[in-house]
Image (spheres, grey):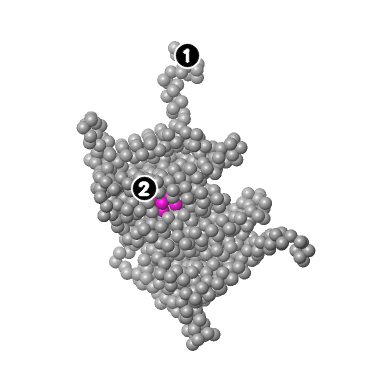
Amino acid sequence: MTATPTTVAPNGGGTAATLSRLVRRNGWVLTLAAVLALMFAFTKVIQPHYGMAAVSVLVLAVLPYAFATAGQSVVIIAGGIDLSMAAMMTFLSVSAAALMQGQEEAFGIVVVVAILAMGLGVGAINGLSVVLTRVPDIVVTLAFFFIWEGAALTVMDAPGGAVSTWLKELIIGNVGADFVPREISTYLPKALLLLILMLGLVWIPLRRSKLGLWMYAIGSDKRAAHRSGVPVDRTKVAAYAVGGLFAAMGGLALAMSTGIGTPTQGPYLMASVAAAVLGGVALTGGRGGLVGPIVAVFILRLARQDLTLMSVDPNVAQVVEGLIMVAVVLVGATVAIRGRRA
Amino acid sequence: MTTTAQPMSSSGSRQRVAGFRRLMRDYPIIPLLFILTVLVAVLEILQPGIVLREDGLLGLNDRWISNTVKFAVPLAILAAAQTMTMITGGIDLSVGIVATMVAFVMSTQVASGVDPVLAIPLALACAALAGLASGVGIAIFRVHPLIMTLAVGLVVEGLLLVYQRGMLGVSAQIPEVITWLGTGKSFEVIPNSLLVFVPLALFVGFTLRRTGFGRNLYAVGDNEGATRLAGVRVWQVLIVLYVISALLAGVGGLVYVGLIKATTLSLAVPLMLPSVAAAVIGGTSIFGGRGGYSGTIVGAIILQVLASMLTVLRIEEGTRRIIYGLIILGVTALYVRITQERSG
């Protein structure tokens, strides 16, 4: 037996081979997960009382970042970039808060559906403008950065509006249904479940569909995709629309966690790009998935939480966070150049 | 003219369109001045007396004109940074916060007893550092300028907050020379800010047109690979460029704080978007290789007149931003059409 492993491994289809394939294909994601686990351990060391309550806080903070990053990742995979991500989130979030103000609880459902549809529409407008004007993505979405920001200010020029109570409760606390075993419910914040559900509902079917494949195709080589019969323009618009859908979820998450709408942009644009890059999405397009970026969001948010736990001045923490993001993007860009040369 | 010999009127009009395109491309200043005149005329119609006044100098409302110029100057200075970076195919999204930082650092240092003669260079040195950081990221690590300057802006904003906490006891104080420069007028009509602006504009114009560095900027924007193969050290050009850009932003911030006369942490941030718009309107291509400062100056004045008009029409801030965004998108799309015509 001692001599066989080398010969068995390539053609033996056992669990070991499956496992090694899994590791090879998802090496970066697994590395990130390991980093996250180490960071949790580190957090527990510096703050022995760190427990599920703090994790719930973390997940709440992660929510808008995660949706922004998911949207950004989809667009980057399809070979674009959406600089209006944070602006769209702001616009959709204030729209939600404005629509729900003074309405009955049940009306919230209508608003949620409307906002998600608006997200698709807003994203599609970005994508259509890129395709129709033939101006580079980065310039078009810069213009929309201002346009959606202006739109948010038009809806509401000061923080205000309201959010249905059931929506707010949707992300507070842990999952507490009777049929869920207590062991699980105490370790599963509602916000985390919501995040996984929403991302999974959109991404898993998309990833398996023809459209998902096309997105990767146009992101990695537009011309080759076009010659293989991929409708490049339509796929691009669809990718931006999905980005807008995630922005809508992010906007709703913002409104849900604050209970109001705020017409100023949060730091979600830079954070979304940095987390996507850290999560293994190449800025050149066509590579990466959603799991990596989401783990990256957790890493970046936990880093921020750790800084707070170490009682670092919040302003200094913002600088450190900014520097981490700059470093991530710097390294990501360098890797992208290497990849292009290789 | 050969056009007259051709019987087909459609080809004649096509040539006229091509001629217009060439005019737009090569001398954007002519259509720009035309647009400016139209805007001013519309403004006068909307609010009679705002431009023309019988008792004013030369029959014009000199007060309105010098005010427009006064507000256009800081914008034009920030737009100079934008023009230079855009010529290389870049952009500087940190100008707003860098300008704010310079104004804030200068006024707090003056308030804590530092002589303005020292405080101003000190504040500008901070700007140069920010520009250096952007430049290194863009030139050496090859990060897209948009993302890099946005990120540096974020870090600068954070540092400014930290700095502000260290300066809690100190109230900001704007030295007299800065207010004189920002708000004062000589001979009752000529804004003093022109004393800074005219030499600065000449310097930028000269740098772009007559120096090797300027030519390198156009070359990098036109074809970076070819420029590198021609022996230009592109990374050095880019680092110097982003330092200059930050310094220009800093000077703009100093003039602006003299105009606004209040130091806040969001002082010049609202100028960021118009600075991009001014350069884009002025005919500088956001893709690099084409443009100049004279167009940008007219672009800044156009935006200022447009701002007056939006104020007269009582249009709110939100709608204003939408309009600026649409202008950037529309004008860029137009230029793409024009340049594609040339190559196609």
Q: Which residues are magenta?
A: A84-90
Magenta segment's dominant SS is helix
Helix, strand or loop at label 2? It is: helix
Q: Which residue is mark 2?
A: A114
**Callout 1: chain:** A
Q: Disc 2 or 1, which lies upstream in sequence?
A: 1
Classify 10 Å Cα crowding around label 1: few (below 14), some (14-19), many (20 and above).
Answer: few
Q: Quadrant of residue B259?
A: bottom left
Instruction: Tell me which residue sits at (45%, 13%) in the image.
Output: A2
Instruction: Tell me which residue sits at (60%, 68%) in the image.
Output: B31
**Callout 2: chain:** A
Tell whether position B91 is magenta: no
Please name whichever residue, B37 or B129, is drawn nearer the observer in this view of the structure. B37
Helix, strand or loop at label 1? It is: loop
- Quarter of the rendering occupied by the C terminus of chain A: top right
Residue type at mark 1 is Ala
* Residue A266 in sight here: no
Image mark for residue A3: 1
The image position of residue A142, as x and y in percent, is: 48, 54
